[in-house]
Image (cartoon, grey):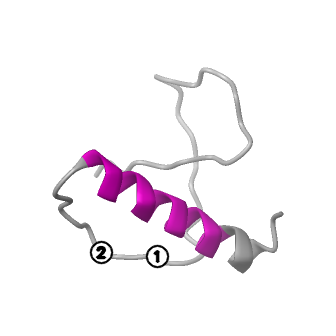
Amino acid sequence: MKIEVHIFDFDENIYGENVVVYWKKYIRDEEKFSDVTELIDKLKDDEVQVRQFFSIN
């Protein structure tokens, strides 16, 4: 199984590294977007939701 994980406020190259991910909150099902702008808007909404859940400002 492969998943994509966005780590907020993290700026290091960890491609190829093994990481452990603890699932804390399910955000949404996989979606298909009509264009990149729609995708970017949804990712911004996701970030707001996650930061609120973890109280990260």
Observer-nearest of 40 and 23 = 40
Say how many tags the image has: 2
Percent coordinates x, y for residue 34 in the rendering: 16, 57
Q: Residues within 10 Å of mark 2 (few under 14, many from 20)?
A: few
21 lies left or right of 11:
left
Q: Position of residue 18 (x, y in %)?
A: 52, 34
Mark 2 → mark 1, Cα distance in angstroms: 7 Å
Which residues are the magenta region?
Answer: 36-50
Identity of the residue drawn at 46% across and 22% down:
16
Q: Residues within 10 Å of mark 1 (few under 14, many from 20)?
A: few
Q: Which residue is mark 2?
A: 29
Which residue is found at the position 72% from the left and 77% from the top?
Answer: 52
Q: Which residue is mark 1?
A: 27
Residue 9 in which image quadrant: top right
Q: In front: 45, or 21? A: 45
Residue at 29% from the left image edge and 75% from the top image edge: 29
User: Height in image: 41 above or below 54?
Assistant: above
Image quadrant where one finds the C terminus: bottom right
Q: Main secondary structure of the magenta part?
A: helix
Q: Is residue 18 left or right of residue 30?
A: right
Query: The disc labelled 1 sits on which kind of residue?
Result: Ile
Q: In this rendering, would 4 be left or right of 2? A: right
| Residue 12 locus on image (x, y percent) | 68, 24
For label 2, the SS is loop
Residue 53 location in percent, x, y? 70, 79
Residue 38 falls inside the magenta stretch = yes
Secondary structure under the numbered disc 1 in the rendered image:
loop
- Say which residue appears at 55% left-offset and 69% top-offset: 23
